[in-house]
Amino acid sequence: LPKLLPRLDEEGEVGKAASEALEKLRPRKADAKKILRLLEHSNPAARLAAVRALGSLGSGEAAEALLRSLGSGDREVSEAASAALRANPAFAPALIRALEAEPDQARSWKIADVVRSYKDALDAKTRKAILARCLALLENRDEKYRLLFEILRTVRLEDLRAALLRRGRELMKNKKFGEAESNLRLLEPEDLAVPESDLALAVARLKQRKSDPAIALFLRILRRPEFPVVQHLDAARGL
């Protein structure tokens, strides 16, 4: 890196070659501050190369810099920052924190899309933290829950479904049928629904005398002959 830096200031092929070499470099953490300073370099190619090089660091400082670049008006810089963040799941905790702090909706969805790209690369601890925060935001009626919901829908749908179904059943046991419906309704789309969630939602609606939407769900359940609907209705009778 020390040999490359002076070459970045040169014009023509030398500066271009130095920028290309920087992109391929895997910088050490000790080089982070030097790479970060290059984001302000007068040479656009050097700035772009610095964005791409930051992806291998995975540090909080690198994440902050890449998030700023993600919101750049320069499409090439924004796309390079997105690619750098997607390439390293170590950025996930910093990105989750940034989601809640980000006031701009478009930028928030850009960040969420990056986290969704990690899929199976997210460790269990991170997935559990995302789920807990999603449920807390949902309970507080904070619309930012939707960002985390969509992340979980991609990376760990079964955990999200189980948590919402469990929460809906708890609310019904406490006779909070309206709140239960609000939770369970999130599982109503066909790509998210399972017979257990459809049945719980149907019962929540019946308890509020919403017969027509409840019957529609029962009809959907009956198209799944392997599901023991009568047995489950008996279990739900106490509600």
Image (spheres, rainbow, N blue to C red):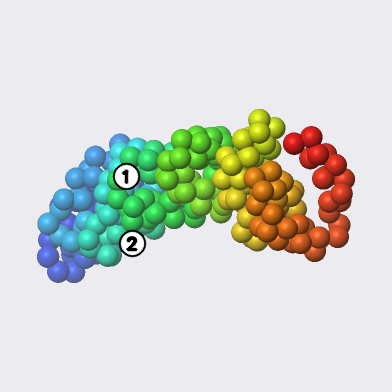
Q: Give the mark, 2 or 1, whose residue is nearer the N terminus.
A: 2
Answer yes or no: is residue 192 visible: no
Instruction: State the image coordinates of residue 204 (x, y, percent, origin top left).
Output: 67, 44
Answer yes or no: is residue 209 visible: yes
Instruction: State the image coordinates of residue 68 (x, y, percent, origin top left).
Output: 26, 49
Q: Are the residues tagged 2 and 1 within 8 Å (C-beta)?
A: no
Question: What is the quadrant of residue 190 in the picture?
Answer: bottom right
Q: Report the amino acid beneath label 1.
A: Glu
Q: How many labels sit on residues? A: 2
Q: Residue at x 49, y 55 (%)?
A: 117
Quick one: SS at disc 1? loop
Instruction: State the image coordinates of residue 95 (x, y, percent, origin top left).
Output: 40, 43
Quadrant for the C terminus in the image: top right
Within 10 angstroms of label 2, few (less than 14), some, or many (20 or more) residues?
Answer: some
Quick one: 47 or 186, which is closer to the camera?
A: 186
Residue beneath disc 2:
79
Q: Which residue is drawn at 87% across and 45% down?
A: 231
Would you say 13 lies left or right of 152 here?
A: left
Q: Residue at x 28, y 65 (%)?
A: 76
Quick one: SS at disc 2? helix
Within 10 angstroms of label 1, few (less than 14), some, or many (20 or more) residues?
Answer: few
Quick one: 124 or 62, which is closer to the camera?
A: 124
Q: Residue at x 27, y 60 (%)?
A: 77
Quick one: 218 or 142, which is closer to the camera?
A: 218
Give the residue at the far bottom of this rendering. 13
Q: Which of marks 2 and 1 is in front?
A: 1
Residue beneath disc 1:
102
Quick one: 133 or 211, which is closer to the camera?
A: 211
Question: What is the quadrant of residue 45 in the picture?
Answer: bottom left
The Cα atoms of the two marked residues, 2 and 1, are separated by: 19 Å
